[in-house]
Amino acid sequence: MLSQSPLPATSIISPVHATPHSAPHLTPQHLPPPPQSPSSFTALPPRATQLSPKSIATAPQKITPPTTTHPTLNTIQNVVLGDILFKTWYPSFYPDELVGRETDRLYVCRWCFRYSRELMPYLGHVKVCEMREGGPPGQVIWERDWYSIWEVDGDEDKLFTQNLSLFAKLFLDNKSVFFDVSSFLYYLLVHTTPGTNERQIVGFFSKEKMSWDNNNLACILVFPPWLRKGLGKILMGVSYGLSQREGRIGGPEKPLSELGKRGYLRFWSARVARSILAAPARKVITIKRISEDTFMLPDDVIAALKEMDVLNAKKKADGTAVVNKVKVKEWAKLHGVDVDLTHFVNVDGFVNGWMPVAAREGT
């Protein structure tokens, strides 16, 4: 049977963007037809049958499983999301009585993230999943080309966000902290296939409803089959779009993992470069001015400038550091930064009339 209720309400808080390995996008084959009477959403029996259907592509994987192990967690070797099979990177907190302590393959609905160890209940569910036609819960807040961002309230859609968190834990390791999903908002990155209008969630980030540190992002993840496509920049850009619409300078929850830090340094550097190059000639540019223009924290602006290596060796008499604008242009050209774009995520992409929760509540 397909699982409906995961663990007690949980959320993953981890500013990790990616892993050093990228899962291949396997060529899907036709799945066998679902049963005539799809199974209801009840708990799996203690003893579930482990299947190896040939109907799902099983091309050789190029991902090396992580060496980190968590003996108290259950280990799932592979996951099937829709019709794509790929390896997991880390254990998750799926209930042992539903998926077992050691599982070779877990089937996860690509629309609602309900899961099963058994193939037939999974096939029965995907045929009738309510989100297949209606789309994810929540509302669309941002759109660009064939991508959109949907805002989901963890308090209003607990089951969906719990199952999403359990799935995300398979690809997140550092700083995994669990809270009640009610205190978080989730922003789903959804791709719509031209022609068929079929939707696929390819990543997400979460954000605390109330952050005393003005964090605009808690957890960020692009699902393995869609890595290395620049999608992380969309998620990061939208998070800063939220900061802008809230009127708050912010950034991701810290400390960042090494991988998360590298991803953010690339994003911050491009954002800072655009701000500097858009400034009028001979105008004094301060860290405060860049921070206000980009809605980045001053420390993050400084980290980006150091990463770009665009500060002159000699400082002014008063100790002020000087940014070499020529070096900034060279850096932008070398890294393919389009200086004609104000931001990678245009704020005009936000749906007319939509405002973040914090701005709506005046907090």
Image (cartoon, rainbow, N blue to C red):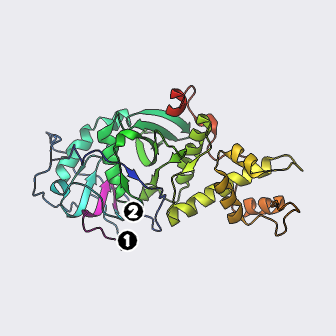
Q: Position of residue 205 (x, y in %)?
A: 46, 47
Residue that badge 1 annotates: 66
Taking the image as shown, residue 113 lies to the left or right of residue 266, namely left
Image vertical order of residue 118 relative to residue 214, above or below: below
Amino acid type of the residue tagged 2 in the rendering: Asp
The answer to whether marks 2 and 1 mark residues whose Cβ atoms lie closer than 8 Å is yes
Q: Measure how far apart labels 2 and 1 are at the Cα level.
A: 10 Å
Residue sitting at the far front: 318
- Return the mark for residue 173: 2
x 46%, y 54%: residue: 222
Q: Nearer the viewer, residue 259 or 115?
A: 259
Task: Give the secondary structure at mark 2.
Answer: loop
Q: Position of residue 326 (x, y in %)?
A: 83, 61
Q: Position of residue 272 (x, y in %)?
A: 70, 53
Task: Give the secondary structure at mark 1.
Answer: loop
x 82%, y 58%: residue: 325
Does residue 342 appear in this view? Answer: no
Q: Is residue 77 magenta?
A: yes
x 56%, y 39%: residue: 242
The residue segment tinted magenta is 61-86
